[in-house]
Amino acid sequence: MQLETNWTHTAPRTVDIHAASDSRPKRTPMKPTVLIVEDEEALSTLLRYNLEKEGYDVAVAMDGEEAEIQVREHLPDLVLLDWMLPGVSGIELCRRLRGRPESRNLPIVMITARGEEADRIRGLDTGADDYITKPFSTSELLARIRAVMRRIRPALAEDIVTFGDIVIDRAAHRVRRADREVHLGPTEYRLLEHLMQHPGRVFSRAQLLDTVWGSDVYVEARTVDVHIGRLRKALNAKGEHDPIRTVRAAGYALDEQVPGASSE
C-alpha cells in the first residue's frame, strides 16, 4: 500500500474577534479524533493512513508519557493503545487514564502481540474496551473501532443527536429546539455539536479553541465568550432555560439540569 506523505505547513493566523463567523468557510461536522499510541513508526503510519481514509482525525504518540500529555491537552474520542511501549507501558497508561475523572469513560482499544488468554483478561480488567492481537487485518480493526464508538459514544455515530429539547440533524446540518428551528452560524453549530457530544463535561476556553477552531489558527480566548454568547442568544430566543453553564475560571459545559437531559 502506498502511503500519503504530503504535508503542508499552515502558519498561525489571527482572527478578528469582531469578524462575522459566517464569513469563515463552512466545515463538515467535526470528525471523531483517534489517538494512536504506538512506538513502531511503520505501524503507526499505516494506522494513521487508514484511519484518516476512514474519516477520523488522528493524533500519534510514540510513548506513554507523550500520550498522557496529549490526552490532558486535548481529550480524544478514542485511544488505540499498544501494550508494549517504552517507559510507561500501555497497561499502566490505561490504568492511569481510568483513574482520572476526565478520561474515565474514554474508549480504549488495546493492540498487542500478547495473545494469551491471561493477557487479554488483564487488559480488559485494567479498563480496555476491546483487545486485538497482532497481526490483525485493518478491516477488523476499523470494525472494532466503529463498534466501540457506537457502544460508548453513540452521539459520534448517529446523524441525530439530542439533549433535552435540543436536536441536531447532522445530515441536514440543522438544529431544532422544541418546536422551532434554531439558526446558527458555522462556529456556533460546531460549538453546540461538541458540547452535545460530551454533556456535563466542562471544557476550558483553550480546549474549545483547539477543537472548534483548530490548532493551526490563533484566536484570543475571549473569542470563545463571544461565540458562546451568540449560541445562547439563538438557543434561548423564546426565553427557554439556558442549557450552557458557565464555570467560573474553568470554562463552559452543557447543563445537565436541562429538563429531559442526561449526561454521558
Image (cartoon, rainbow, N blue to C red):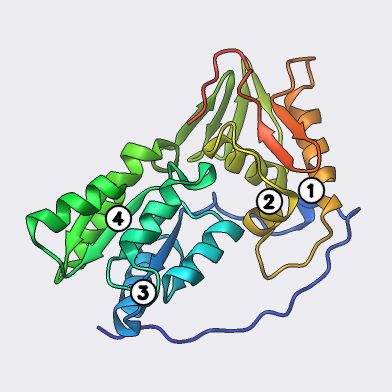
Q: Does residue 140 appear in this view?
A: no
Label 3 Cα neighbours within 10 Å, binned few <14 / some 14-19 / many ≥20: some
Q: Nearer the viewer, mark 2 or mark 3?
A: 2
Residue corresponding to mark 3: 49
Residue corresponding to mark 2: 208
Q: Measure the alpha-carbon separation of dots 2 and 3.
A: 26 Å
Residue corresponding to mark 1: 224
Residue corresponding to mark 4: 109
Q: Earlier in the sequence, mark 2 or mark 3?
A: 3
Label 2 Cα neighbours within 10 Å, binned few <14 / some 14-19 / many ≥20: many
Which amino acid, by three-letter code, is at mark 4? Answer: Val
Q: Nearer the viewer, mark 4 or mark 2?
A: 4
Q: Residue at x 38, y 72 (%)?
A: 48
> As displayed, is residue 190 above or below residue 211?
above
Q: Measure the alpha-carbon separation of dots 4 and 3.
A: 18 Å
Residue 209: % across, % down: 71, 56
Q: Earlier in the sequence, mark 1 or mark 4?
A: 4
Q: Earlier in the sequence, mark 3 or mark 1?
A: 3
Apparent side of residue 258 relative to residue 50 in the rendered image (left or right): right
Tell me how many marks there are: 4
Q: Measure the alpha-carbon separation of dots 3 and 1.
A: 32 Å
Q: Residue at x 31, y 81 (%)?
A: 40
Residues at marks 4 and 2 touching, judged by CB atoms closer than 8 Å: no
When asked about the image quadrant of residue 118, the answer is: bottom left
Residues at marks 2 and 3 touching, judged by CB atoms closer than 8 Å: no
Q: Measure the alpha-carbon separation of dots 1 and 2.
A: 7 Å
Q: Nearer the viewer, mark 4 or mark 3?
A: 4
Residue 84: % across, % down: 28, 72
